[in-house]
């Protein structure tokens, strides 16, 4: 069953088509990757889906509801939540309070009835995200790897149906990627959260996702399994330039 | 887990207790008057902090909301001998509505534009006070308002009890999930929206609550002086910001203490005559340069500092 359907999404900034007629589906429970070089329009695509930027044309269907043009708050309350490439922790607050904010939305008010229940839920997510030992720390004191983990954990605390992760591994060392990768897989396998992921760290990315949508210059150039995608001439050319595919195959 | 009462809390409670006992200990009516006015300023500052300290939306026209409470009282008093028990609820409702009405369009503005819009609101109100001087008394203001109570000492207790209740309510709001959400909005509006927080609604409601307490305090000051005029309302917009910045933002109590302390200080500096503004401004500049987080925030942190230095947990983790 398709949970998220993107149809002919278009966004122009002046003369530049940042996202040009992109269409694809995401199935329930899937782990989908969005691949493309810098400036391909991946983050703009996320901004369009989550309502942070208004689309010029095209539609976004989420669980059969047309969410095109809705406010980011409303979309998040429906269970479609995104993270940001540049971490956005709530400053001057503890990790616990950062996660708590995610439980104060209208959606979570219905799901969490009492303060003890809230505490149990936050601690559960913290345990899953391997943040339990820093819950009482102020976020200002956390290293970058933890902030990246917190970014994912915040989104998970809002108990989303689907989560759009914008480069969760950016700027991390190999050792820091592993825990975040684990969190994403656990959320997907244990909670059934659907995952859509933008990432440049290809090795880790390929291990994580089951299907890839490749984008270049705002257009969808390919779609398929990781193996199909890395052998796709168009995808190779988008990274290496024209003739890149021949170079790789020779 | 037992909750320990922290040293700053004990000190604030002790200070409040001292104020309650002050008229019994000393019969200095001058100081009692100074304290009464300082307490009203403490509420002004605390109410400003709830909007501006918590959400980072600096309101440069807080005087406008004080004016709503004060002038409502002044205008009604021309016809009726209106008593505090009636004027306070009216002021609360009117200033809440006014705060919401101003907040709805202006809180969408970002950064300095919001500050300018709020400044404009207060300026327009001030100009209107002069333009409609037939009603407002213009520069002379309005007289003949019922006194708060019969004498200075009972008026002092009235103001003190009001201030304690108002500041306590604002403090509790600040500590609640509502206050936490406001702080998240201050840190990153988009990140809060991404988690499903309707940030505009929270900000507008905070504006409404902030205006309510400003309006009530404005009414009480009108009763206290038995007078309402532009001079006791409009210059406050800036004074209050200074008080909050010096006291410390985002915790209600530090801002309230800033309001009380600076109000008291400016009264004490009167003896210096022409020098008083210079000394006052000098103190402000020094605090902003050397204690940018606010005097009482820093004192509070020093008193509370725990034995576990922050970051311990992480350094342990890294060593593993």
Image (tube, rainbow, N blue to C red):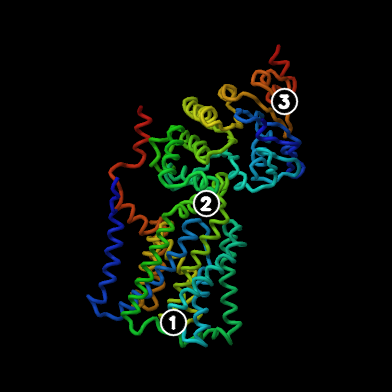
Residue A168: x %, y % from top left: 55, 33
In the image, are marks 3 and 1 on the same chain?
Answer: no
Q: At numbered mark 2, what does the secondary structure look like: helix, strand or loop?
A: helix
Query: Residue A222: which disc?
Result: 3
Q: Residues within 10 Å of mark 3 (few under 14, many from 20)?
A: some
Chain containing the residue with disc 1: B
For residue B23, which quarter of the picture?
A: bottom left
Q: In this view, does A173 lie to the left or right of A247?
A: left
Q: Which of B189/B95 is in front?
A: B95
Mark 1 crowdedness (10 Å alpha carbons): few <14, some 14-19, many ≥20: some
Q: What chain letter is assigned to the residue under label 2? A: B
Please provide percent x and percent y for residue B19: 29, 70
Work out which quarter of the rendered image holds the N terminus of chain A and state it.
Answer: top right
Q: In this view, does A143 lie above or below B36?
A: above
Q: In the rendered image, is residue A85 in sight?
A: no
Residues tagged by mark 3 and mark 2 found on one chain of the structure: no
Categorize mark 2 by other alpha carbons within 10 Å: few (<14), some (14-19), many (20+): many
Q: Position of residue B294 (x, y in %)?
A: 39, 58
State which quadrant residue A28 falls in.
top right
Q: Name the residue under label 1.
A: B83
Could you say which is closer to the camera, residue A194 or residue B57? Answer: A194
Which residue lies at the image location 45% right of the left edge and 52% below the top edge?
B177
State the residue position of label 2.
Answer: B185
Q: Is residue A25 left or right of residue B245?
A: right
Q: Quadrant of the C terminus of chain A?
A: top right
Q: Which mark is in front, 3 or 1?
A: 1
Residue positioned most to the left: B25
Tag on residue A107? Answer: none
């Amino acid at each position: 069953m398709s949970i998220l359907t993107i149809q002919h999404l278009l966004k122009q900034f002046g003369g530049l088509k940042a996202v040009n007629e992109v269409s694809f589906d995401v199935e329930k429970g899937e782990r989908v990757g969005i691949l493309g070089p810098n400036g391909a329009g991946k983050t703009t695509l996320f901004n369009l889906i989550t309502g942070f930027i208004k689309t010029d044309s095209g539609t976004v269907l989420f669980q059969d509801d047309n969410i095109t043009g809705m406010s980011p708050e409303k979309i998040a309350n429906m269970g479609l939540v995104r993270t940001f490439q540049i971490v956005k922790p709530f400053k001057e607050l503890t990790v616990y309070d950062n996660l708590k904010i995610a439980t104060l939305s209208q959606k979570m008010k219905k799901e969490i009835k009492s303060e003890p229940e809230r505490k149990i839920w936050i601690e559960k997510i913290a345990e899953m995200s391997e943040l339990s030992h820093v819950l009482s720390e102020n976020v200002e004191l956390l290293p970058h790897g933890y902030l990246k983990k917190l970014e994912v954990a915040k989104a998970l605390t809002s108990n989303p149906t689907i989560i759009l992760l914008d480069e969760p591994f950016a700027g991390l060392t190999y050792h820091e990627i592993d825990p975040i990768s684990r969190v994403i897989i656990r959320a997907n396998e244990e909670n059934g959260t659907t995952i859509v992921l933008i990432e440049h760290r290809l090795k880790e990315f390929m291990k994580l996702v089951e299907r890839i949508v490749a984008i270049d210059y705002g257009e969808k150039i390919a779609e398929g399994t990781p193996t199909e995608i890395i052998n796709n001439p168009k995808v190779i050319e988008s990274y290496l330039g024209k003739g890149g595919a021949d170079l790789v195959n020779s | 887990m037992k909750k320990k009462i922290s040293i700053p809390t004990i000190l604030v409670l002790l200070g409040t207790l001292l104020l309650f006992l002050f008229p019994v200990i000393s019969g200095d009516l001058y100081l009692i008057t100074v304290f009464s006015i300082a307490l009203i300023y403490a509420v002004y500052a605390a109410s400003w902090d709830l909007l501006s300290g918590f959400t980072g939306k600096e309101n440069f026209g807080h005087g406008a909301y004080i004016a709503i409470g004060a002038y409502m009282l002044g205008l009604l008093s021309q016809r009726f001998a209106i008593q505090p028990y009636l004027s306070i609820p009216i002021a609360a409702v009117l200033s809440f509505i006014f705060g919401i009405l101003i907040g709805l369009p202006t809180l969408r503005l970002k950064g300095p534009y919001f500050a300018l819009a709020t400044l404009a609101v207060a300026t327009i109100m001030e100009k209107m006070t002069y333009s409609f001087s037939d009603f407002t008394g213009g520069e002379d203001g309005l007289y003949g308002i019922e006194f708060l109570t019969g004498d200075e000492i009972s008026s002092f207790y009235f103001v003190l009890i009001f201030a304690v209740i108002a500041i306590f309510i604002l403090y509790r709001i600040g500590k609640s999930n509502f206050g936490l959400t406001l702080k998240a909005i201050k840190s990153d509006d988009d990140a809060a929206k991404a988690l499903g927080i309707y940030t505009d609604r929270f900000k507008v409601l905070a504006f409404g609550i902030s205006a309510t307490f400003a309006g009530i305090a404005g009414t009480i000051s009108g009763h206290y002086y038995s007078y309402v005029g532009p001079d006791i309302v409009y210059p406050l917009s800036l004074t209050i910001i200074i008080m909050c910045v010096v006291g410390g933002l985002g915790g209600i109590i530090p801002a309230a203490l800033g309001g009380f302390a600076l109000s008291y200080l400016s009264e004490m500096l009167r003896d210096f005559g022409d020098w008083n503004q210079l000394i006052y401004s000098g103190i402000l500049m020094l605090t902003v340069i050397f204690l940018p987080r606010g005097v009482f925030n820093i004192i509070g942190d020093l008193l509370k500092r725990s034995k576990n230095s922050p970051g311990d947990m992480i350094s342990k983790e890294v060593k593993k």
